[in-house]
Amino acid sequence: MIFINWDFMKKILVIEDTLEVRENLEEILVLDGYEVITASNGKIGVQLANEHLPDLIICDVMMPELDGFGVLKILNKQKSTYDIPFIFLTAKAEKVDYRKGMGLGADDYITKPFDDTELLSAIEIRLKKSARLKSIDSDDEGLQRFFSEAKANTEFEKLSLDREVRMFKKGDVIYQEDQKARWLFYVVSGEVKVFQTNDFGKELIINIYKGGEFFGYFPLLKETKYVNSAEATQDSTLRLIPEEDFKLLLFNNRDFAAKFIQMIASEAESNEQLLIDLAYSSVRKKVANALVTLSAKRMDEQDNNISFESSRNDLAELAGVAKETLIRTLGDFKTEKLITVDGNKFTVLSLQELKSMPQ
């Protein structure tokens, strides 16, 4: 006799209005060892989700009574069902439906007719991720914050997937001031500088973005043209995310919106500090800050022997000083054994001393 430990069986709720599809799903899932609950429409599905609190929900999109989007909206508003992994199942594969589902916070999207292996694999991945989150030992409030943070990070990952990819050589212009903003940019690899040019042609680097970072969102939010320019400082690969996809997620997913507001606030704070440093800091402090910034873009948290490459022009533009002034200050730092320089390669020997450089 085979003994089944029902306490460890994962419970899956299937919401599907077509009887044949619903029974097929139930059979596949039961054979794979899952406990299955079924609902023939969205309203019943919401009721069963609240009663049974399943480990995962598979839901059709196009249904009478209440469609899949409505089901997800309702469950996302309830604390008890907010973090249940949710997979859409639909015969409609149009991009607009995919975007809407992801924007509302779905974890995956599978089209009919589906492959059994693909479906089971998607379920296993979502359940494992959910289990990892729930295994964290924390107080209720801290755990809820972690769930929200993790869900927001998941949406950020999804936003950058399956988008147009463009390659840029070192020195290539990505966009220029006064161009219409159409894309949110995601750095897959390489490095990008965003800068402004004054009336005399002098450039000031506003920020530097590395792999895993987004940029170009301010003009999208303000619906204005670019007020600065962007250029690849290394051979770079970028993903281009359409404005409408970005806004759909931003205005429909509260976790993503909260995370993005944090990102904007952090960048605004950095830009404010940059302006203060440019106005009041000494040359030594400005150059030290530039070295610290470039170090942070190229390393994990360490305090010694951080190496990076940069041209003197870029370093001067980031520090907001003349190139000749930069070179003299770098010479002083070398003498003081704060850095070493080999061509365009800089090695920071004491990050903490640079950070604590007097004004």
Image: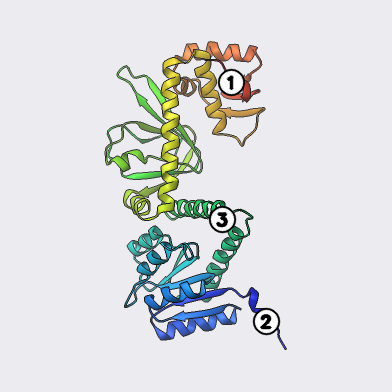
Q: Is residue 282 left or right of residue 44?
A: right
Q: Mark 1 and mark 3 in contact? Answer it, CB < 8 Å.
A: no
Instruction: Give the camera-side residue of 338 and 69.
Output: 69
Which circle's residue, 2 or 1, is located before the other in the chain?
2
Q: Check disc 2 and report its element: helix, strand or loop.
A: loop
- Tag 2: amino acid: Ile
Can residue 93 be seen in the rendering of this structure? no
Residue on which the image places disc 3? 140
**In the image, what residue type sits under mark 1?**
Ser
Image position of 3 with respect to 223: above or below: below
Circle 3: element type: helix
Residue reaching furthest to the right: 1
Q: CA distance from mark 2 to mark 1?
A: 62 Å
Q: Amino acid at mark 3?
A: Asp
Task: Residue at 57%, 34% (x, y): give it.
Answer: 298
Q: Quadrant of residue 276?
A: top left
Residue position for label 1:
356
Question: For mark 2, what is the residue?
Answer: 4
The local secondary structure at tag 1 comes to loop
Tell me the quarter of the image containing the N terminus.
Answer: bottom right
Location of residue 88 in the rendering, given as x and y in whole percent from the top left corner = 43, 69
Give percent across and percent down for residue 240: 39, 47
Question: Vertically, is 174 above or below 21?
Answer: above
